[in-house]
Image (cartoon, rainbow, N blue to C red):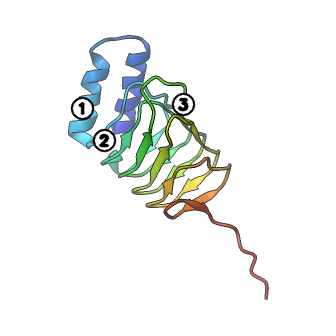
Amino acid sequence: MGPERVWWWMTRAYQRRIPLLPKLLKLVNYFVFRCITPPEAVIEKDLRLDHFGLCFVSHPNVTIGKGVRIYHGVTLASETWIGSPERIVIEDNVTIGVGASVIARSNTSLRIGKGAFIGAGAVVTKDVPEGAIMVGIPARSLEKKVVTE
């Protein structure tokens, strides 16, 4: 069992208002996998935290869709209070590379569109359109170049 499964059980216990279990599971994820996974987040069961989610950090105001793959060292941060309506929304089939940071600016939401790819080490501070490939600091979209001979 990996950190994503522990996180999924943690979010379910939190939603069902089981008082102690989410805190206990959060400690398990931290001490075993060194990742910070808040029970207030909304995640799908098929989320993949590759490389055991080592050093993964998430803000509680996060929604993660189906088929999402997140590598180690990723930070999902938001400059808002826990429980605010602003969220980081990661739609279906998104891949976030090693060491990337997704940072929602002060009291704003941020959305990563379906099928987007966030490159290793990228820093995303603005919405990402569907299918985009984002790289760099700050993250910018790679355009497909047509090679003609």
The residue that mark 3 highlights is 86
Q: Distance from label 2 to label 3 (Cα)?
A: 23 Å
Q: How many numbered marks, from 0 up?
A: 3
Instruction: Determine whether the residue tagged by mark 1 lies in a helix, strand or loop.
Output: helix
Mark 3 touching mark 1, by CB under 8 A? no
Hey, which quadrant is residue 58 in on the image? top left
Residue beneath the point at 35% across and 34% down: 37
Quadrant occupied by the C terminus = bottom right
Q: Nearer the viewer, residue 114 or 81?
A: 81
The residue that mark 1 highlights is 28
Q: Distance from label 2 to label 1 (Cα)?
A: 9 Å
Instruction: Determine whether the residue tagged by mark 3 lies in a helix, strand or loop.
Output: loop
The residue that mark 2 highlights is 35
Expressed as whole percent of the image width and height from the top left, the position of residue 29 reads 28, 35
The correct choice, above or below, for 121 with respect to 10 in the image is below
The correct choice, above or below, for 121 with respect to 114 in the image is below
Q: In the rendered structure, which amino acid carries the disc numbered 3?
A: Glu
Q: Earlier in the sequence, mark 2 or mark 1?
A: 1
Expressed as whole percent of the image width and height from the top left, the position of residue 147 reads 74, 81
Q: In the rendered structure, which amino acid carries the disc numbered 2?
A: Cys
Residue beneath the point at 58% across and 49% down: 126
Q: Nearer the viewer, mark 3 or mark 1?
A: 3
Quadrant occupied by the N terminus = top left
Expressed as whole percent of the image width and height from the top left, the position of residue 83 reads 46, 22
Mark 2 touching mark 3, by CB under 8 A? no
Q: Nearer the viewer, residue 123 or 39?
A: 123
Q: Count neighbours of disc 2 (C-alpha within 10 A) and say few if under 14, some if 14 to 19, many if 20 or more.
A: many
Q: In the rendered structure, which amino acid carries the disc numbered 1?
A: Val
- Is residue 68 rendered to the left or right of residue 116? left
Residue beneath the point at 51% across and 31% down: 44
Q: Earlier in the sequence, mark 3 or mark 1?
A: 1
